[in-house]
Image (cartoon, grey):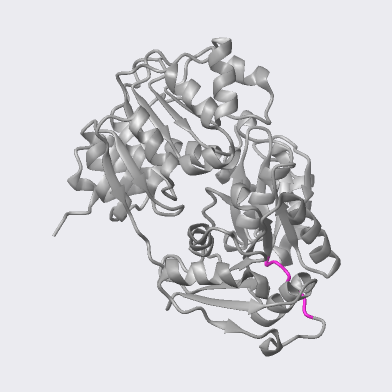
Amino acid sequence: MTDTTFSSLALTPELLENIQSLEYSKMTPIQAQSIPAILDGQDVLAQAKTGSGKTAAFAIGLLQQLDARKYITQALVLCPTRELADQVSKEIRRLARAIPNTKILTLCGGKPFGPQLASLEHHPHIAVGTPGRILKHLLKGSLKLSNARMLVLDEADRMLDMGFQDDMMTIIDMMPQQRQTLLFSATYPDEIKDISNTIQIDPVDIRVEESHDEVKIKQIFYEIEQGQREQSLVALLHHYRPQSTVVFCNRKHQCQELADELWQRGFHALALHGDLEQKQRDQVLVQFSNKSSSILIATDVAARGLDIKDLEAVVNYELSPDPEVHVHRIGRTGRAGKSGLALSLFMASESPKINAIEKYQNISARIDHLATLKAREHFKLIPTMVTLSINGGRRNKIRAGDLLGALTANKIIAGKQIGKIDIFETITYVAVERSVAKQALKILTEGKIKAKRFKARKLI
């Protein structure tokens, strides 16, 4: 039997100790198959979905081979979206805590160029970013990759879908030919194989097929008539009452329209799409992940890379034309041994999509009627938490412990009533139970954090 403990890997004691402190017990399948090859210096072509542990897999490989004493950029990680780039950077930073003075820099569009130029005056050890912004820095000469020996393409299939292929290939052409290239993709279209053939040398081919256990994921399709989608979605929410739901739409303008309609009906719904500014996107993700919002409405592109814990339900407001994307959507629920719901709306004209899903999953689809759903009068899906925003962050040296201390000092609020804390460069978000939100806001506005006053407000 293969040893799947991290201690079986040839890692530095400091890195191994930090991995254990983060309560990583055993390697996931993608980690067990890819990390030894990465540590061996081999190129890797891996198919693995969000939540499979792939970020930690390549992060551990990057950090083990990093020489933190040399202040040169030694690795580049390309991601399709700002959200995924931020998540990847956070994960690498967590794993790098045991390596002193490691600099990981996130370079994405949608953020001011000037501060990034200032940060690049001292070269990062690892650069993480989106193709457009990375290429802009390379052409300007502010980012130098002449010493980079590792390249990671994360969610490579989505980068192709978003039209980044030319930028990707230009960036790769500007990197040293003698390098290790890791290519991770959730799906495996022909274009991925073509790119691998172009940029990789004899890669280790890894496929982690995660079949979703029907016992854990209850999947039901509901046939609807033209013009019934919105009322059908409301009926599903009334009947199943999930505390956290991701609703997938195929078009970004539809996301905002649907979120607005659900607000009118008394649901706390937020939309995630490409037209939001970075601060707005951060707020949406923070509120949904910390349970201050019940419903996140997103496109596949916007939701890619999100790893939300305890997601009760996924609703396909529209079916994806690609059965592999459908499986990727519903696989976000029913994780870590918990049960989940996958509910899909479709019209009779979309029956070929159902057939394709049945064939791909090797299942017989369960189709129910909307008439079986029970409506509830005066039903409100109220989030358990509320998010408070504080106008100070990492730049002000604010830490999670500072906020916990300030909120619990007078013993009016207990530590267990405080939820997730997200600290950004100039802003911090803290989730508190709805019952103590007013007291928490008063404490933050009238009191001090680290002997200093900060403005605070409640997010709706």
In this rendering, position of residue 431 left or right of residue 337:
right
Q: Quadrant of the N terminus?
A: bottom left
User: Which quadrant holds residue 453?
Assistant: top right
| Near-viewer residue (18 or 63) | 63
- Against 107, residue 383 (above or below) is below
| Near-viewer residue (38 or 251) | 251
Q: Quadrant of the C terminus?
A: bottom right
| Near-viewer residue (335 or 124) | 335
| Near-viewer residue (243 or 1) | 1
In this rendering, position of residue 429 left or right of residue 332:
right
- Image coordinates for residue 35, horizontal then vertical, percent: 27, 42
Q: Does the magenta run of residues contain 380?
A: yes
Q: Does the magenta run of residues contain 1?
A: no
Is residue 389 among what the camera can see? yes
- Image coordinates for residue 429, horizontal then vertical, percent: 67, 47
Magenta: predominant secondary structure element?
Answer: loop
In the picture as drawn, the residue positioned furthest to the left comes out as 1
- Image coordinates for residue 458, horizontal then vertical, percent: 78, 52
The residues colored magenta run 379-384
